[in-house]
Amino acid sequence: MSVDWSISFDEKIMPKDMQNAATPEEYIKYHANSVRDYKAFWANIASELEWFKKWDKTLDDSNPPFYKWFAGGELNASYLCLDRHIKTGRKNKVAIIWEGEPMENGKPKEVRKITYNEMYREVNRVAHLLKNRYQIKKGDVIGLYMPMIPELPIFMLAAARLGATFCVVFSGFSSDAIAERMNDAEAKILVTADGAWRGGKVLDLKSIVDQALQKTKTISKVVVLNRTNNKINMTDGRDELFDQVMKDIPVNTYVEPEKVKSESPLYVLYTSGTTGKPKGQVHDVGGYMTLLHATMKWVFDIHDHDVYWCMADIGWVTGHSYIVFGPLMEGATEVMYEGLPVFPEQDRWASIIERYGVSIFYTSPTAVRGWIKGGDQWVKIHDVKTVRLLHSVGEPLNPEAFRWLFKHVGREMVPFGSTWWMTETGGIMISHVPGLMMVPMKPGTNGLPIPGIDADVVDEDGNSQKQNERGFLVIKNPWPGMPLTIFKDPDRFKEVYFSKFKNVFYAGDYAVRDPDGYFWVLGRADEIIKVAGHRLGTYELESALMKHNSVAESAVVGVPDDIKGEVPVAFVILKQGAQPNDTLKNELKDTVRKTVGPVASLKDVIFVSKLPKTRSAKIMRRVVKAVAIGKPPGDTTTLDDEASVEEVKNAYAQLSGEVGSS
Ligand code: 6R9
C-alpha cells in the first residue's frame, strides 16, 4: 500500500512534558556512535540479561550472512521470562490479564489474571508433559495451532524451557497451510484446541487439524485443549485431551531449564514468500532476547507499574515478540485478548483499555481505520486516559489514522509511533524511542532506526538514495534478532535477503528518507501484500487458484482498501471451455479461502484472456495493479521490473482495453 502523500515532512509534534526530548540531529549523533562499534554496543545490552554462561564471541561473523550472536553463550528464554521474576519480587505480580471474547450482561464472561508464579507453575507442568509423555527434547519441533488463550504462550515457554523449537501456525490458516508448515518443520506433535472464538462464532480448529493430519508425515500425537465445548472427533492412539494428560502432573513440578546455546533455534515462523513455499524463519535465543529487551525499554518504555497491551495475534511475529517474549522477559503486566476488538460492538477495545487501565497500547493501522469508520462516539464513552504511550505496526500508518488515535486516545500529548520491522528482523528496527530519547513525531512516519541498527534507503545500485526519493530499505549491519537462516534452506536465505545488495539485508520494502533523516516506509516492493496487517504472498493465492480445474493462469495483486490497507484481486485466464460467470467467481474465491485459510479473501476475480509479461516471461504486476485500480501504470522509468517502457505501455493498453470492455 502507498501512504497518503498529503503527509508533510515538516509537521513536527512533540509529546507533552517529555523529559528526554531531543532534536533529530542530537539523536542521529547518538545513533551514529551506537553503530560505529555496534558489536560492543549490543554486547553491553546483552549483558543486562542473565546468562548461564557468558559468550565467547560477541559476533561470530566467519560465515556471512549466517551470523551467530553471542556465540558460545548459554541462556534460556523461559528462565528469563519466568524464573528470574519468581526470584526477584515479581512472584505474585500479574503477568497476563486474559479476557475471553464472549460477553454476558455487558461484561466479559471470562477473565483470567495469571501471576508470574502461576505462569511458572504451568510452564513447568507443560514442560514435564512434553518431556516425559512426548519425549520432546532439545532440537525437536512442536507445532502449535491454537486460539489466543494463555496456554499458547505457556506451550511456547515450555518448549523454550526444554531447548525445543516451536512453530506456531496462525489460526486463520487452512489445513493445507498447516500441513505444509508441519511437514517442512518436521514437527513431532501438534497442539490445538477444539475451537476458537472469533466474532461470536466458533472456528473449528480441530476439524481443520484432522484434515491437515491426513497430509502430514511426522506428527504422531495431537494434544487438544478445550476452549469452546465444540463437538470434536478424537482419533484413537493419536489425539489426547490436554486436561486428561495434565491431570496427574503435580502443581509443584519443576523442570530444570536447559542451558541453551545463544545461537540455537528458539522458533521457526513461516512467512509468505514471493515465490515457492513459505519460508521458515529461524530465530535464535541470545540475539533475539537481547533485541527484545532493548526495544521493550526504548520503544515501549516499559516499567513495573505499566499495563501493557499488544493487540496482535500470537500467530504472527508481533505476538511472538511483543506479547510473549518481550513483555514477559521484562516482568510486565500485560493484557491478552482472545477475539475481535470490535465484538460485540465497536468499543470492545476501548472498554478493555478502561477495564484494566492500559498504559501502553500497541495497535495497528487496520484496527484504527476500522474504529474511525465506526464513529468517535464509541471511544468517547470510555475513560482511556491511562494510556501514556502508543505505537502501531504492520503496515504504513496513514496520517488520518495517526491523528484520530492521537486525539481520541493519546489526548494529543503522548508519544505515538509507527514501528517498522518484519518477521525476519525479529524485533523493531525503525521507530521512535520514547524510553530513550524522543524526537518530534510526524504523522505517518516510522521515525529513525533504533540504536545499533544501520538502516538506509538505497537506489538500484545500492547507493544511498537522495533525500525525498523513493528507494529500497536495507539494513547494513548484522543485528541481534536476525534470522539464523531459512529452515533447511540456507541458499534461499542468502538469495532472498543478501543477493540484491552485497552483504546488506534487503527488506523488500520501498522507503523514503526526509530531510530530517526520518524514514517513511511506503509498502512492499515485491509480491507480498499486507491484508489487514496479515502478510500474504500473491504466489500462495495464485497457487491456490491453480487448484481449480478451470484456471489456466492467474495474477493476484493488492489494491488499496480504506480499512484493510490492501486487499487481493485476482486476474484469471480460464482454460478453454470454462465459462466466466459469477458462479465461477465465487467458486474461485472459495477455493482460495479453503486452500490458504479465512485470512485470504479475494475481493474480486477478473477474467482476462492474457496477462502482461516481460520478455523474460515475468508477469508485470505493476501493470496488472494499475489496471486493477483504474490508473495508468505511471512511472515507466522502472525501478521494480525489467520490462521496457514500450512493453509496459503496450501491456497496459491491452489489458485495460480488455478489462474495460468485458
Ligand atoms: C512486524 C510485521 C513485514 C512487512 C514489512 C512492511 C510492513 C510492518 C510497518 C510496515 C510500514 C510499519 N510493515 N510494519 N510498513 N510501516 N510500521 O508486520 O512483520 O508480518 O513479517 O510483515 O510489513 O511491508 O516488510 P511481517
Image (cartoon, helix red, strand yellow):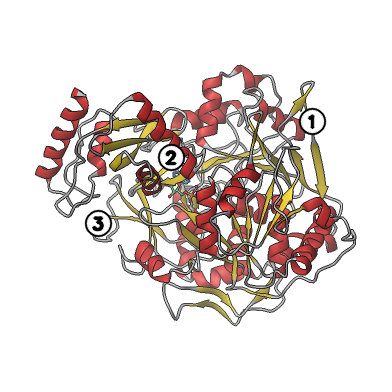
Q: Position of residue 182 (x, y in %)?
A: 55, 59
Q: Tell me which amino acid carries mark 2.
A: Val
Camera-side residue of 71 and 5: 71
Q: Position of residue 486 (x, y in %)?
A: 46, 65
Q: Which class describes the residues within 10 Å of circle 3: few (<14), some (14-19), or many (20+)?
A: some
Q: Which class describes the residues within 10 Å of circle 2: few (<14), some (14-19), or many (20+)?
A: many
Residue at 49%, 30% in the rendered image:
401
Q: Earlier in the sequence, mark 1 or mark 3?
A: 1
Distance of mark 1 from mark 3, alpha carbons?
55 Å
Is the residue 67 above or below the residue 594 in the image? below
For label 1, the residue is: 109
Quadrant assignment for the N terminus? top left
Give the farthest residue toward the left: 646
Q: Earlier in the sequence, mark 2 or mark 1?
A: 1
For label 3, the residue is: 460
Q: Tell me which amino acid carries mark 3.
A: Glu
Quarter of the image holding residue 240? bottom right
Element under disc 1: loop
Element under disc 3: loop
Left or right of 401 on screen, residue 100? right
Left or right of 211 on screen, residue 609? left
Distance of mark 2 from mark 3, alpha carbons?
34 Å
For label 2, the residue is: 592
Q: Any atom of ligand 1 within 8 Å of the CB at mark 2?
A: no
Camera-side residue of 98 and 172: 172
Residue at 21%, 24% in the rendered image:
662
Q: Any atom of ligand 1 within 8 Å of the CB at mark 1?
A: no
